[in-house]
């Protein structure tokens, strides 16, 4: 039965309690089923136990298949990383909550970086694993020393960049030709335009711009100066 338990051990800690509870429920139902077979159906103990084991094995196989399928689907979900300045965190929190219902996974450092993680390494991992970037344009983010290197690296890695206008700050030169979602007058208007853009299929992207010549190996950052 090691084939049943190994996938459970390999699961993330936050997922294990759910599976443990599910297994406990199955075992409880199997006990009830067994007792019903023995005392109500007149089935001998050995035959009843054998039937219970068959049913339990079948349920375990279905559970493992379902978990594997869910993991594959989760890995296939498009990931979108938010680049922003820490002073804009309140806006980003609202945006993150609004985008959670969309059919893609939004990567926000406040939710993804855990206690004990190396912050810089984790941010780089989130950045590299994403296919798209939401860049929150504000006076704070434009003034940050991580902005241009991060944008240059996104262009180099052929990621789609979705600019978000939070105030009247001028977008970086590399993004001035890209239509931005405008949140300056209305959060709802900006949100719906951004969500619609995020849901569109990606067309064949052009090669990285030669003008993006800022330190391509500089580690991306989010929420930091």
Image (cartoon, helix red, strand yellow):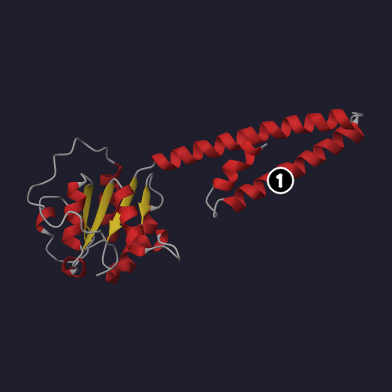
Q: Nearest the camera: 69 or 189?
A: 69
- Judge whether 107 appears above or below 78 on screen: below
Residue 212: percent from left, percent from top: 11, 52
Residue 102: percent from left, percent from top: 38, 47
Identify the residue at image location x=21%, y=66%. 141
Q: Quadrant of residue 91?
A: bottom left
Q: Quadrant of residue 167?
A: bottom left
Q: Residues within 10 Å of mark 1 (few under 14, many from 20)?
A: few
Q: Nearest the camera: 103 or 182?
A: 103
- Secondary element type, mark 1: helix
Q: Nearest the camera: 154 or 178?
A: 154
Identify the residue at image location x=18%, y=67%. 145
Identify the residue at image location x=84%, y=31%. 48
Left of 73 or right of it: where is 225?
A: left
Q: Quadrant of residue 190?
A: bottom left
Please identify the quadrant where the C terminus is shown: bottom left
Please identify the quadrant where the N terminus is shown: top right
Left of 4 or right of it: where is 185?
A: left
Residue under label 1: 25
Left of 62 or right of it: where is 151?
A: left
Q: How many marks?
A: 1
Residue 74: percent from left, percent from top: 44, 42
Judged from this view, the residue extending furthest toward the left is 211
Left of 24 or right of it: where is 136?
A: left
- Judge whether 88 appears above or below 22 on screen: below
Residue 219: percent from left, percent from top: 25, 59
């Amino acid at each position: 039965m090691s084939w049943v338990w190994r996938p459970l051990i390999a699961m993330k800690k936050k997922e294990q309690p759910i599976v443990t509870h599910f297994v406990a429920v199955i075992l409880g139902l199997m006990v009830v089923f067994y007792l019903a077979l023995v005392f109500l159906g007149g089935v001998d103990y050995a035959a009843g136990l054998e039937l219970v084991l068959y049913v339990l094995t079948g349920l375990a196989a279905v559970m493992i298949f379902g978990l594997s399928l869910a993991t594959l689907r989760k890995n296939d979900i498009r990931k979108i990383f938010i680049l922003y300045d820490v002073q804009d965190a309140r806006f980003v929190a609202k945006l993150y909550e609004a985008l959670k219902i969309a059919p893609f996974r939004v990567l926000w450092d406040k939710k993804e970086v855990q206690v004990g993680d190396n912050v810089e390494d984790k941010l780089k991992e989130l950045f590299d694993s994403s296919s798209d970037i939401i860049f929150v344009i504000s006076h704070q983010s434009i003034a940050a020393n991580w902005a241009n290197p991060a944008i240059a690296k996104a262009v180099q890695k052929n990621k789609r960049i979705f600019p978000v206008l939070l105030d009247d700050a001028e977008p970086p030169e590399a993004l001035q030709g890209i239509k931005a979602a405008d949140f300056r007058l209305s959060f709802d208007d900006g949100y719906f335009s951004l969500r619609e853009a995020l849901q569109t299929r990606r067309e064949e992207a052009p090669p990285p711009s030669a003008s993006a010549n800022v330190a391509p190996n500089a580690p991306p950052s989010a929420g930091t100066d």
